[in-house]
Amino acid sequence: MKNQTSQYSDQELCILLSDQGSSADAAFAEIYSRYSSRLHAYCVKIMNDYDEASDIFQETFIRFVQAARNKSEMTNVPAFLLRIARNLCLNAKRDKKQTTEPMDYMLVSEDRNYDKKQLLDLIDDALSKLSEEYKEAFVLREYDGFSYQEIADITGLSLSNVKIRVVRAKNQIREILQPYIKELS
Amino acid sequence: MNKDLELPFEDKIQLYLDGELSKEAEVGMFAAIAASDSLRDLFRDMLSIREEVRNDHRAFVPAPMLTERVVTAVGLGLPAGLMTAPTIGVGTAPIVSGAITQSWITILGFISALLMAVVSGYYYNETTKYEAQIAKKGDNSSANISTTEIVTSSVNTPSLSQVLQQIVANATNIKAQPTERIIYKFVNSGTNTSNVAALNSIKEELKAAEYAKENLKNLLADKTRELQEAQFKLDRINGSLDAEKQRSELLTKEVQALKDNLATVEAIRNELLNEQSKAQQKQANENTKTTETKEVQPNDTAILDPISKKKFSLTLGLRGLTSQSYPNPQLIQASETDFLNNIAISSLINITDNFAVGVEGGRENFGLVFSEITAPNTTVYYEKNPALLWGGLAVQGRLNPIESMWGIRPYLRGVVGGAPIGILGKVLGGVEFPITPTFSMSLATEGTFLQYSLQQNAFSTRKFGVTYGVQMTIK
């Protein structure tokens, strides 16, 4: 079944998933195999908290399966998944903002010792210094590999806005990391 | 007009790397990169960042437990033993990975695979030699049996070491071959079915070993991440703990200081209470003593005499006079001007330290000029200088001692009284010089007025002069 499902398009897999037959398991496995890594990266990077990101990751797939079973129209499955995850992340961040101090993470992050870091850690820190809009643009582009048009579809922004956000986010990240890249490379 | 052409080169590079730059703008961008070190650095930096992001295993690979959670939550099952691990990185194909989540099973699988490889190694070696000989003879029949998906091996049958090397190479080149699906299929010539079976067996075991390796890598990454998170949380907790310790120490010091202050205040309070108690006791004793005194000594002057009770003092004074009468008598006998005919004594009760009342009397000469009708149309004029006794009530006010002038006390005294021939008034103004608390000397100016009458005619005389004396105060 695996060999077969790997040949199917996303839409065909969604149809299999909605049938709830024996092929639904394989269809879900294939969709999970295709998109879980991008979704996971988005949740982890946007939420910056592994437990919360895991909850959102799980909830996204639950809602996705429900939508598939309801035969909702999904022309772009990864974008659909990301939209669900994005809404959940926004809700979680809004709730979190009401209960916790937003500076808490920043303060801890500042205490880290840059000398002992690898570039990935530095990228994480640099990401945390970006505004939420720029961070999301960077993650959707660099971690999830979405095109600018897909990012515009997911976020509901205009293409030119997406272009500006992605470019500025990358420039800012590079600006922050520039002193360390040469040392680490 | 193409808007990309107007962008800064930095932005053009970012767009180019994202595949979003127009072809027209690319030309100018490459020319700028060729001419600028900083743009080349930017290009390299962005490639480094992108490469690093795609190696972010922690971000891209959900923990096996999370995958199980998701599968359970959505109410679906996955193909047993072959649950496909998620794709790593952007645009990469899925990696074949086992869903063996129990590490001990994977370890056992790995060990059994190695054992199988060793046991079948010799036989396999011989087979490959045989196949090599056939290949040399130009027998190409094996090519017809090849499967369609050939990724990692050539059409020629590889040796075991080549297979192992290829597997390792495939495992390590997963990221380097992002668009290829890694499928471990072994191709053989098919001339020897037992060899094929053995090789298939080895292939399966090696695949299991590879699954184990991947799972162990995943598990290691997962645990490493958990460890980092735990360390992160621990650091935060330690930070909070340090802050709480400092706060606790500060509060302890404050509490101790407050305790000390409280003890001090308590001691002062106790001391004051003792003093109050002593004062009350003393007052009670005094009251008792006074009551007893009243009962036992009813004649005590302190009680009966209000002046004494108020501790009034008595000042006795003796002073001499040197004064001139107006009008001047024509005849003044020497005997009438000596000291004893020009003195006064006083006794004043000091109501307060500044005010006193009392009596004063003395003897002094007065120049008298008066007339008497001795017969009709006969008037006799007299000029006399008699020494007259006088006396009266005295009132005195005095200022507090002027410390800057040896403690002198200015005073003013008035006397109203009489002499045998008429009424008399005196006014004195001067200063007292304290010698001891009991004795003092005085120096003052004095004016006296005496009015007398004869045969219903009123006459008067006045005197002005200086008076000097001593006082003794009895408390």
Image: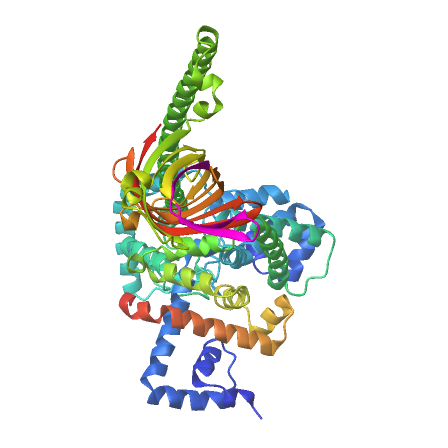
Q: Among all residues in the image, which is located at the extreme bottom?
A: B1
Residue A176 counted in the magenta span: no
- For the N terminus of chain B, the image quarter is bottom right
Looking at the image, which is closer to me, B200 or B128?
Answer: B200
- For the C terminus of chain B, the image quarter is top left
The magenta span reads B366-392
Looking at the image, which is closer to me, A185 or B432?
Answer: B432
- Seen at 48% across and 39% down, the residue is B418
**Left or right of A122 on screen, residue A34:** right
Question: Is B66 located above or below residue A136 in the figure?
Answer: above
Q: Quadrant of residue A93?
A: bottom right
Q: Quadrant of residue B141?
A: bottom left
Looking at the image, which is closer to me, B338 or B400?
Answer: B338
Picture coordinates of residue B155, whole percent (x, y): 37, 64
Picture coordinates of residue A48, whole percent (x, y): 49, 54
- Seen at 51% across and 52% down, the residue is B379
- Tell me which secondary structure the magenta stretch mostly adopts: strand
**Left or right of B318 on screen, residue A145:** right
